[in-house]
């Protein structure tokens, strides 16, 4: 990136949201209080949505907020509140898992960084009107036309993801139903 | 005067189209639009509070506040003043940062959602962000983060009533958000657009009546084609079902009676804001009422034709008023008549919700969850599927396609009702184990059965 492109409006937006994403991501790991860590994760998700916005992907940005910040993280907070994990009392028994996770993420981050370094340029900016299949990239029409185009590979992955979610839903129902039956049998 | 109007700065600020104005003019315009939206949105809160208390009084056979100012109109001001003058108490052992942050988090998304609500059809001045083409998704995103304020307030207060209120509120909002989202998707299917102004346009006939010499000339002026084109009457039963689902989930989202379990006084003191006093409580209060106004405004925009009149002529000043130049007439149509219709519909709808609050008892918690997940969500989902079927069949067969979809819907509904009836009958005849451990028999009737009847 040249200095000029950094100092443009888009570049400043990128810098702001990238810094916020990194800072809040670090806070997720560092903070002891689970609720505060979860809130940092919310801020992180918002900054990533901001990055999508600076790439002109309005649809992706709003969906990111609706799904992750609005639904999944609310569920996280709900569980944290329900279990009343206000105090930091859960950092003892996971040392082995932590080491593995740390190594895995270090390898992933290193791979990403080296890819950017080899390629020489990260795709932080998109020209305003990139066209995909006759529609603006990042708009609802653009995403839809690419995602549901049978000649492109993404339709298959999309349908299988929805199938996977369906399996997960049915699995959750079966597990919950079993527990209810057994508790009724005890009573 | 004419020198001012013809000066380049004035033209940049108010006249030229938004495509070719300098950045400072765009900035000033954005600021002005935001001030207009704030005045309309937050300025309505005291009126709303007054209206609610007076109407509740009327329906409950009492007077309501009528002492401060004419008809008690200044009562909300007096209340706000009282709240601000009160001592601000912070309980010990609260999570300070989150405790202070929560009221702000409750209020900010509400103000954010003001940005996409259109109040007239001008593409430069019709909303704070009239060019955002994912307006509805933005609204859904903002609505989905509103619950954080409640959760944080409940958790950080270090009070079990607050925590229970926060838990109830978050589970309720998550559950009813799904019905809300699906009813909005139904509207998207019917209109095929995500931009708020285009949504209103799709419920009208757009005629190109440009207003000369002003920035209003860009967008076509939308003239109402009659209320039967509103989304609530589109694809007949389906639009109505979507509207009803939206309205029910909207009451649940704003935690109002009969869905006001998060702040049920008899069980939870005051729910998540039990520990809040003074200005912080005022912020929760303001957020709640502003939210009620905004979800109603969204309902008007999505289903009831937004800022357009129910009948074409009512939306315009008569062109025969020759003593005004046509530009003035058109300007008045945009700036006065269109927002007036928006507010008229808005307050009618809100009065209806106040009537609901005045007349309906509070739900039990398990009823609330059962209704949300087992009635509202399947209804909304089936509605979306039926709308899609209807649209697809209409492409194949024309108008008859819609009738086929309605017939399919009727068959499905009658099968579901029949199965539900059989289920209910089976449960009623014995099968005590599947019952909830609640006494179903009416207490009054049980007592009456034991008492001798005296004539």
Image (spheres, coloured by chain):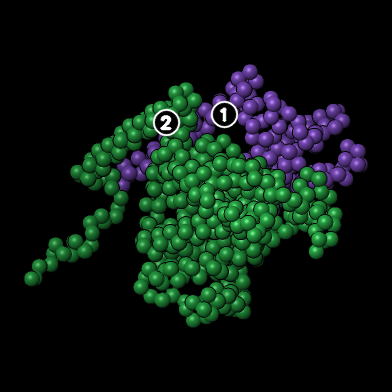
How far separated are the C-alphas under marks 1 and 2? 32 Å
Q: Would you identify the image quadrant in which residue B96 lies?
A: bottom right
Q: Which chain is green?
A: B
Indicate left or right for B424 with A115 as reference: left
When asked about the image quadrant of residue B275, the answer is bottom right
What is the secondary structure assignment of the residue under circle 1? helix
What is the x, y in percent for residue A46? 68, 47
Residue pointed to by mark 2: B402
**CB of mark 1 within 8 Å of CB of mark 2?**
no
Quarter of the rendering occupied by the N terminus of chain B: bottom right
Tint applied to chain A in the drawing: purple
Residue B287: give x, y in percent of width and height.
Answer: 58, 62
Q: Quadrant of the C terminus of chain B?
A: bottom left
Q: Nearer the viewer, residue B42 or B349?
A: B349
Q: Chain of mark 1?
A: A
Of residues B306 and B83, the one drawn nearer to the viewer in this rendering:
B306
SS under mark 2: helix
Quarter occupied by residue B236: top left
Label 1 vs label 2, nearer the camera: 2
Q: Which mark is residue A161?
A: 1
Q: Is residue B237 visible?
A: yes
The residue sitting at 27% across, 36% down in the picture is B418
Q: Is residue B19 left or right of residue B317?
A: right
Residue furthest top as drawn: A151
Which residue is painted at 53% across and 43% down in the image?
Answer: B203
Query: How many residues crowd mark 1 within 10 Å: few (<14), some (14–19), many (20+)?
Result: few
Looking at the image, residue A56 lies above or below residue B163: above
- Residue at image point 47% right, 57% down: B349
């Amino acid at each position: 990136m040249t200095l000029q492109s950094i100092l443009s409006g888009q570049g400043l937006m990128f810098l702001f949201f990238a810094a916020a994403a990194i800072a809040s991501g670090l806070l997720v790991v560092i903070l002891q209080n689970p609720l505060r860590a979860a809130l940092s994760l919310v801020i992180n998700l918002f900054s990533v949505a901001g990055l999508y916005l600076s790439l002109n992907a309005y649809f992706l940005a709003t969906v990111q907020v609706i799904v992750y910040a609005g639904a999944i993280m609310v569920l996280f907070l709900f569980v944290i509140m329900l279990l009343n994990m206000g105090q930091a009392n859960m950092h003892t028994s996971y040392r082995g898992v932590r080491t593995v996770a740390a190594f895995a993420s270090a390898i992933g981050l290193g791979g990403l960084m080296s890819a950017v370094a080899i390629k020489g340029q990260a795709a932080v900016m998109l020209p305003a009107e990139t066209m995909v299949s006759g529609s603006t990239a990042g708009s609802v029409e653009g995403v839809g036309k690419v995602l549901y185009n049978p000649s492109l590979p993404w339709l298959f992955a999309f349908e299988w993801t929805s199938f996977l979610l369906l399996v997960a839903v049915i699995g959750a129902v079966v597990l919950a139903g079993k527990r209810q039956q057994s508790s009724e049998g005890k009573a | 005067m004419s020198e001012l109007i013809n000066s380049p700065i004035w033209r940049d600020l108010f006249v030229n189209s938004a495509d070719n104005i300098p950045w400072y003019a765009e900035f000033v315009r954005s600021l002005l639009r935001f001030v207009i939206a704030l005045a309309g949105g937050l300025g309505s809160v005291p009126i709303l509070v007054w209206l609610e208390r007076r109407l509740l009084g009327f329906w409950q056979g009492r007077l309501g506040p009528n002492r401060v100012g004419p008809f008690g109109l200044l009562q909300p001001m007096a209340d706000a003043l009282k709240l601000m003058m009160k001592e601000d108490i912070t309980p010990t052992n609260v999570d300070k940062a989150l405790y202070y942050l929560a009221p702000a988090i409750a209020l900010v998304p509400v103000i954010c959602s003001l940005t996409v609500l259109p109040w007239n059809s001008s593409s430069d001045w019709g909303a704070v962000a009239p060019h955002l083409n994912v307006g509805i998704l933005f609204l859904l995103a903002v609505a989905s983060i509103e619950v954080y304020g409640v959760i944080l307030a409940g958790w950080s207060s270090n009070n079990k009533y607050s925590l229970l209120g926060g838990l109830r509120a978050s589970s309720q909002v998550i559950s009813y958000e799904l019905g809300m989202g699906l009813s909005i998707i139904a509207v998207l299917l019917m209109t095929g657009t995500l931009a708020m102004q285009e949504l209103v346009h799709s419920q009208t006939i757009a005629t190109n009546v440009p207003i000369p010499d002003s920035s209003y000339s860009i967008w076509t002026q939308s003239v109402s084609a009659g209320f039967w084109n509103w989304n609530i009457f589109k694809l007949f039963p389906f639009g109505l079902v979507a509207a009803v689902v939206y309205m029910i989930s909207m009451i649940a989202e704003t935690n109002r009676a009969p869905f006001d379990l998060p702040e049920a006084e008899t069980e939870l003191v005051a729910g998540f804001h039990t520990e809040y006093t003074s200005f912080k409580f005022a912020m929760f209060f303001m957020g709640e009422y502003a939210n009620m106004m905004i979800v109603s405004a969204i309902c008007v925009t999505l289903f009831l034709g937004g800022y357009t009149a129910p009948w074409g002529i009512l939306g315009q000043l008569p062109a025969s008023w020759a003593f005004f130049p046509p530009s003035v007439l058109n300007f008045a149509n945009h700036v006065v008549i269109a927002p007036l219709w928006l507010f008229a519909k808005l307050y009618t709808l809100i009065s209806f919700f106040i009537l609901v609050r005045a007349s309906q008892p509070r739900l039990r918690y398990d009823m609330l969850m059962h209704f949300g997940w087992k009635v509202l969500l399947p209804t909304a989902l089936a509605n979306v599927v039926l709308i899609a079927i209807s649209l697809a069949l209409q492409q194949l067969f024309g108008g008859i396609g819609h009738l086929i979809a309605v017939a399919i819907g009727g068959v499905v509904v009658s099968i579901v009702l029949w199965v539900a009836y059989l289920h209910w009958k089976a449960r009623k005849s014995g099968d005590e184990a599947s019952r909830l451990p609640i006494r179903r028999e009416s207490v009054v009737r049980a007592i009456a059965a034991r008492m001798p009847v005296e004539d």
